[in-house]
């Protein structure tokens, strides 16, 4: 088992060019979103220095202005963020088309990455949209009845503890169902890379998932666990850090970017594990 994990880790690490490419795209998009949000907040509040003043401590007047103008800020941001969400979805599908095809074929070059991304983008787009619809339907089936029946939480559940455990149970159930859809989506896209037609690939992906359900599901749950662990470690490392000097700020930024790279590597590791 450990030899298999080491082998998959080695294959994932060899995709370092793809990992850096995905990281770079995410960094650029994240920076654009941050700049847009910052300018909108500053513009709505009326001074480019207002947000900076909050770093020195709580200021009731600034906080009140933010609350009063929050609907206006959201209205301004929504129009831009809607476009950003669509752009991010398209870029994500394109990047994953190149990544999954490289993993499937055992390629490591950026040239092959972009070549295959162009070939499989539209087919991957269809699978992703179908999986997105499935996720929405599954989440609606799980959560809509809960919100319809909840009424007064304390009357419905008799105690806060019952409510909390119910919500935790539904969150876990949602995650377990979403893992199944994600696995089916990845397996279907691998079949597309194998030059199968869309419907054939989706059927083949489902049959393969069912026939090896325990093995694939362990991979999916393992990835969730790895993300939880890495998030916990990140919180543990940076929780007590301040931003009192330029060195601590620089160290914090470097640490944040390092953890972002690790999360992308974990994703590549998961795709490689499913491929094996």
Image: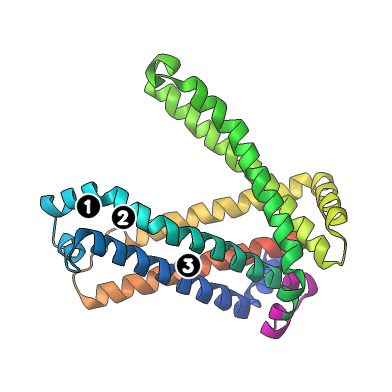
Q: Nearer the viewer, residue 113 or 213?
A: 113
| 111 left or right of 206 in image | left
Q: Is residue 112 magenta?
A: yes
Q: Which mark is residue 260?
A: 3
Principal SS element in the magenta part? helix
* Residue 120: x %, y % from top left: 76, 69
Label 3's element? helix
Of marks 2 and 1, the one in the foreground: 2
Magenta region: which residues? Answer: 100-114
Does residue 251 lie above or below 86 as drawn? below
Q: Nearer the viewer, residue 92 or 57?
A: 92
Label 1's element? helix
Q: Which mark is residue 66?
A: 1
User: How was this image coloured?
Assistant: rainbow
Q: Residue at x 31, y 58 (%)?
A: 239
Q: Residues within 10 Å of mark 2 (few under 14, many from 20)?
A: many
Label 2's element? helix
Q: Nearer the viewer, residue 85 or 212?
A: 85
* Residue 260: x %, y % from top left: 48, 67
Q: Residues within 10 Å of mark 1 (few under 14, many from 20)?
A: some
Q: Quadrant of residue 80?
A: bottom left
**If you read the primary sequence from the N terminus, does the residue marked by circle 2 or circle 1 appear first?**
1
Q: Quadrant of residue 170?
A: top right
Contact between labelled residues 1 and 2, with CB atoms less than 8 Å apart: yes
Does residue 168 lie above or below 152 as drawn? below
Is residue 58 visible to the viewer in this orientation of the structure? no
* Residue 50: x %, y % from top left: 17, 63
* Residue 177: x %, y % from top left: 65, 40
């Amino acid at each position: 088992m450990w030899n298999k994990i080491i082998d998959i880790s080695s294959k994932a690490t060899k995709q370092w060019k793809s990992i850096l490419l995905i990281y770079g795209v995410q960094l650029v998009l994240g920076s654009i979103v941050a700049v847009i949000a910052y300018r909108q907040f500053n513009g709505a509040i009326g001074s480019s220095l207002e947000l900076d003043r909050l770093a020195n401590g709580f200021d009731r007047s600034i906080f009140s202005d933010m609350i009063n103008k929050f609907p206006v800020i959201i209205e301004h941001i929504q129009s831009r963020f809607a476009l950003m969400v669509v752009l991010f979805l398209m870029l994500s599908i394109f990047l994953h088309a190149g990544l999954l095809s490289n993993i499937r074929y055992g390629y490591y070059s950026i040239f092959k990455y972009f070549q295959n991304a162009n070939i499989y983008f539209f087919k991957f787009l269809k699978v992703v949209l179908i999986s997105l619809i499935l996720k929405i339907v599954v989440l609606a089936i799980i959560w809509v009845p809960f919100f319809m029946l909840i009424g007064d939480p304390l009357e419905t559940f008799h105690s806060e503890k019952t409510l909390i455990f119910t919500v935790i149970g539904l969150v876990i159930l949602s995650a377990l169902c979403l893992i199944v859809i994600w696995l089916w989506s990845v397996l279907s896209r691998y079949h597309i890379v194998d030059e199968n037609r869309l419907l054939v690939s989706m059927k083949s992906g489902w049959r393969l998932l069912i026939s090896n359900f325990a093995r694939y599901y362990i991979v999916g749950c393992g990835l969730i666990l790895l993300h939880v662990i890495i998030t916990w470690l990140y919180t543990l490392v940076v929780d007590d850090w301040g931003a009192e000097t330029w060195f601590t700020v620089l160290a914090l930024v470097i640490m944040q970017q390092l953890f972002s790279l690790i999360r992308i590597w974990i994703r590549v590791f998961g795709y490689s594990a499913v491929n094996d």
